[in-house]
Amino acid sequence: QVYLQESGPGLVKPSETLSLTCTVSGASISSSYWSWVRQSPGKGLEWIGDVYYTGTTNYNPSVKRRVTMSVDTSKRQFSLRLKSVIAADTAVYYCTRMTPGNDNALDVWGQGTTVTVSS
Amino acid sequence: DIQMTQSPSSLSASVGDRVIITCRASQSMTRYLHWYQQKPGEAPKLVRYGTSAFQSGVSSSFSVTGSETNFTLTIDPLQPEHVATYYCQQTYRIPHTFGQGTKLEI
């Protein structure tokens, strides 16, 4: 069974950097792409981007200038950094697995972590 | 960006009914269209990927059809545990985009 667990601060001040980590268990971090998806309060889902274990990334243009994703294979973790946050970045952030063999569907999701941007 | 439009935005049906949710893409795509179920307070869960693939651990009540720009998720028969919001997503082009969701109630 594959599990993903998000971790990081639940509160970030405006203009600062949001940093989240996702720990992978039950699967090789070298076998898939790893994605981040967020959901603003009462809203739908937004794909933020993904990262491969080699460091190759794809980002949503809506956040591309502010986002960085990376992988630490030794720790079986991947990370999201979003700089210069604003109130609109307040959301539940999910880490997910994207499997090319499943037509790039997001087949495993973490439970999500709530991040609030507020002073 | 490929825009994904779901219809209806919400619907109410009865146990045992056949429910159809539609997802329309602004550009033609092949098979990279997926469906997720999200229950209140939970993370989304993949219920079908591609156009017809079986998803391990997911009810056989779910079926999918479609191609190019029109795709459907059918739930038959509807059961109480199917109450949720359903999202379609395309992974054909970056950015991968989601539909706005369809809230299903009984």
Image: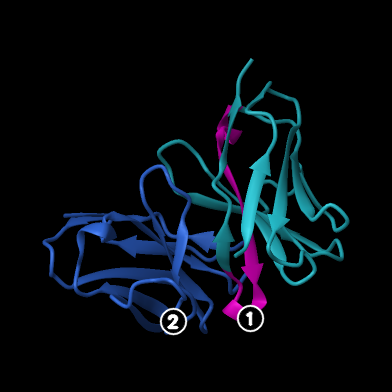
The residue singled out by tag 2 in the image is B54
The answer to whether any part of residue B1 appears in the image is no
Residue B71, percent from left and from top: 37, 77
Residue in the foreground of this view, choosing between A40 and A86: A40
Q: Bounds of the magenta span?
A: A87-105
Q: Amino acid at mark 1?
A: Gly
Residue at (76% x, 47% y) in the render: A79
Please check the rendered image and state whether residue B79 is part of the magenta-colored stretch, yes or no.
no
Please check the rendered image and state whether residue A98 is part of the magenta-colored stretch, yes or no.
yes
Q: Secondary structure at mark 1?
A: helix
Residue at (66% x, 77% y) in the render: A100
Q: Residue furthest top?
A: A119
The residue singled out by tag 1 in the image is A101
Q: Quadrant of residue A53?
A: bottom right
Q: Secondary structure at mark 2?
A: loop
Crowd class of label 1 (few under 14; some 14 to 19; many from 20; radius 10 Å): few
Residue A36, percent from left and from top: 64, 52
- Check if mark 1 and mark 2 are on a common chain: no
Residue in the foreground of this view, choosing between B37 and A83: B37
**Quadrant holding the N terminus of chain B:** bottom right
Crowd class of label 2 (few under 14; some 14 to 19; many from 20; radius 10 Å): some
Q: Is residue A93 above or below residue B96?
A: above
Residue in the foreground of this view, choosing between B44 and A118: B44
Dot 2: chain letter: B
Residue A21, percent from left and from top: 73, 44
Q: Is residue B71 above or below residue A88?
A: below
Colour seen for chain A: cyan
Q: Which chain is blue?
A: B
